[in-house]
């Protein structure tokens, strides 16, 4: 019988951050930060809480995945510093994955795919990919941060096959603006799900 692989996914660049704990390709538990900005001490307490609740010790972790590229710069640095430090002390694998790329796990068809994450009340991060037979390539050079109005114009001009849009379910992120009616016909991700969940799913799936 193959040994269970314990994976910890860490996302710290949006709001209070989130954590997901996986056994192989199955998420067994998750944690969401309650504060407006991720703080290292809160993330460490969240990790300890997740592991203790599920009867694991830090030494049981085989892989740590950390979000890269998009979101708040301070949060990104916190997550990467924590991930590298923990992986070194635990002698486990360290990986960085783009949140926007990880959202591709939700696609329902191949072709040109736009993924986007709401950053605040007026801005989003987005990236454009091409997916064919489980092979993914970037169309845009990098992730882009822009205003919602600019993003709306981009969607009108882009012949995409699938659009995946994540809105943060956080008390600091209001979704009451009429701007979001622009996206009512597109595929939303469940607001209760963590961005860290997709990091783990994309790696283990």
Image (cartoon, helix red, strand yellow):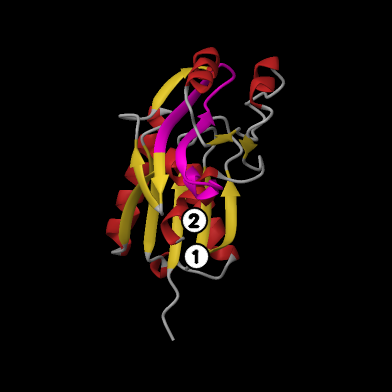
Find out whether residue 110 is within the magenta segment: yes
* Circle 1 SS class: loop
Residue 12 seen:
no
Pointer 1 and pointer 2: residues touching (CB < 8 Å)?
yes
Q: In which quarter of the image is the N terminus?
A: bottom left
Q: Which residue is drawn at 61% across and 32% down?
A: 167
Q: Which residue is drawn at 52% across and 46% down?
A: 109
- State the image coordinates of residue 166 (x, y, percent, origin top left): 57, 35
- State the image coordinates of residue 194 (x, y, percent, origin top left): 57, 45
Find out whether residue 197 is within the magenta segment: no
Residue 63: image quadrant is bottom left
| Up-down relation of residue 105 to residue 149 (above or below) | below
- Residue stretch rendered in magenta on the structure: 103-129
- State the image coordinates of residue 155 (x, y, percent, origin top left): 52, 22
| Up-down relation of residue 173 to residue 97 (above or below) | above
- State the image coordinates of residue 14 (x, y, percent, origin top left): 50, 33
Q: Earlier along the polypeptide chain: callout 1 or callout 2?
A: 1
Label drawn at residue 72: none
Foreground: 76 or 193?
193
Q: Mark 1 points at which residue?
A: 25
Label drawn at residue 201: 2
């Amino acid at each position: 019988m193959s040994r269970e692989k314990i994976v910890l996914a860490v996302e710290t660049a949006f709001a209070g951050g989130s954590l997901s704990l996986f056994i192989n390709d199955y998420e067994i538990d998750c944690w969401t930060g309650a504060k407006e900005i991720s703080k290292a001490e809160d993330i460490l307490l969240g990790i300890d809480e997740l592991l203790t609740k599920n009867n694991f010790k830090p030494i049981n972790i085989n892989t740590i995945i950390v979000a890269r590229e998009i979101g708040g710069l301070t949060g990104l640095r916190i997550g990467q510093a924590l991930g590298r430090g923990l992986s070194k002390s635990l002698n486990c694998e360290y990986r960085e994955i783009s949140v926007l790329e990880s959202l591709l796990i939700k696609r329902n068809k191949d072709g040109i795919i736009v993924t986007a994450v709401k950053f605040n009340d007026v801005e989003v991060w987005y990236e454009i990919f091409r997916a064919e037979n489980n092979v993914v390539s970037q169309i845009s050079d990098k992730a882009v941060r822009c205003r919602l109005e600019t993003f709306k114009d981009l969607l009108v001009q882009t012949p995409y096959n699938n659009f995946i849009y994540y809105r943060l379910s956080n008390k600091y992120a209001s979704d009451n603006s009429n701007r979001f009616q622009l996206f009512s016909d597109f595929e939303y991700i469940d607001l209760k799900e963590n961005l860290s969940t997709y990091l783990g799913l994309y790696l283990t799936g």
